[in-house]
Amino acid sequence: MRATEPERAERPSVKTAGILLGLGLGGFVDGILLHQILQWHHMVSEVDGLAPNNVADLRLNVVADGLFHILTWVLVFIGVLVLAEASRSRRSIRPVRRLVGWMAVGWGVFNLVEGVLNHHILQIHRVQPAASNPLVYDLGFLVLGALLVVGGLAIQRMGSSRPDGTADGSLER
């Protein structure tokens, strides 16, 4: 028996799981690579009155980075739970491409929201404030986000049909 539209809308979807996982994993890449490994910036490194070479201010930035990582961890955890429930409520999760595509969309959305909000509106940090032209890095971060969204949408659409050309009903968008 086929599920009705309201029943289908209530089920957790791979789309939701993928976007949540992409948001969280994109945040982890940002925090681990840009904050910790490259040490280009911290969460609030550009806030007026904070000196990046002052130990007390660095501690505040490390705490802010930690809170940011808690948020990204929660997004990944919820994404895993949604994915588990989506897989339980369907016969299979065959088209992994759809999940990967939605994860790329989520990562791209993370870059776009975080980039516009933190780099341009709130101006609490830049991607690479020590660069001769930090705006290039900030814009590159946004371009990467847009490419991830577009590429992710293309990837997940490739996983939306069976080899015989019929629609794959095992996953919702």
Image: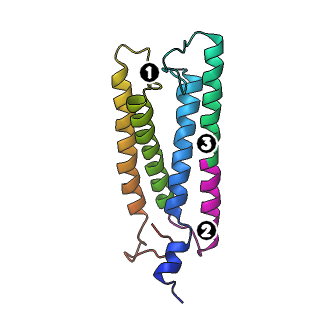
Kind of residue at disc 2? Ser
The residue carrying mark 2 is: 87
Callout 3 environment at 10 Å: few (<14), some (14 to 19), or many (20+)? some
- Please give the count of numbered marks on the rendered protein: 3
Residue 110 vertical placement versus 47 (above, below): below
The image quarter containing residue 160 is bottom left
Relative image position of residue 156 (x, y in whole percent): 42, 59
Cα distance in 3D space between marks 2 and 1: 40 Å
Q: Compare marks 2 and 1 and give the one earlier in the sequence.
A: 2
Residue in view at x 63 percent, y 22 percent? 60
Q: Is residue 88 left or right of residue 138?
A: right
Q: Nearer the viewer, mark 3 or mark 1?
A: 3
Q: Is residue 117 visible?
A: yes
Callout 2: helix, strand or loop? Answer: helix
Q: Is residue 45 magenta?
A: no
- 10 and 57: which is toward the camera: 57
Q: Compare marks 3 and 1 and give the one earlier in the sequence.
A: 3
Q: Nearer the viewer, mark 2 or mark 1?
A: 1
Give the residues drawn in magenta, as a range: 75-95
Q: Is residue 147 left or right of residue 80?
A: left
Q: Is residue 96 visible?
A: no
The residue carrying mark 1 is: 128
Q: Assign the C terminus to one quadrant of the image.
A: bottom left
Kind of residue at disc 3? Leu
The residue carrying mark 3 is: 71
Q: Nearer the viewer, mark 3 or mark 2?
A: 3
- 32 and 162: which is toward the camera: 32
The image quarter containing residue 145 is top left
> Is mark 2 in CB contact (under 8 Å) with mark 1?
no
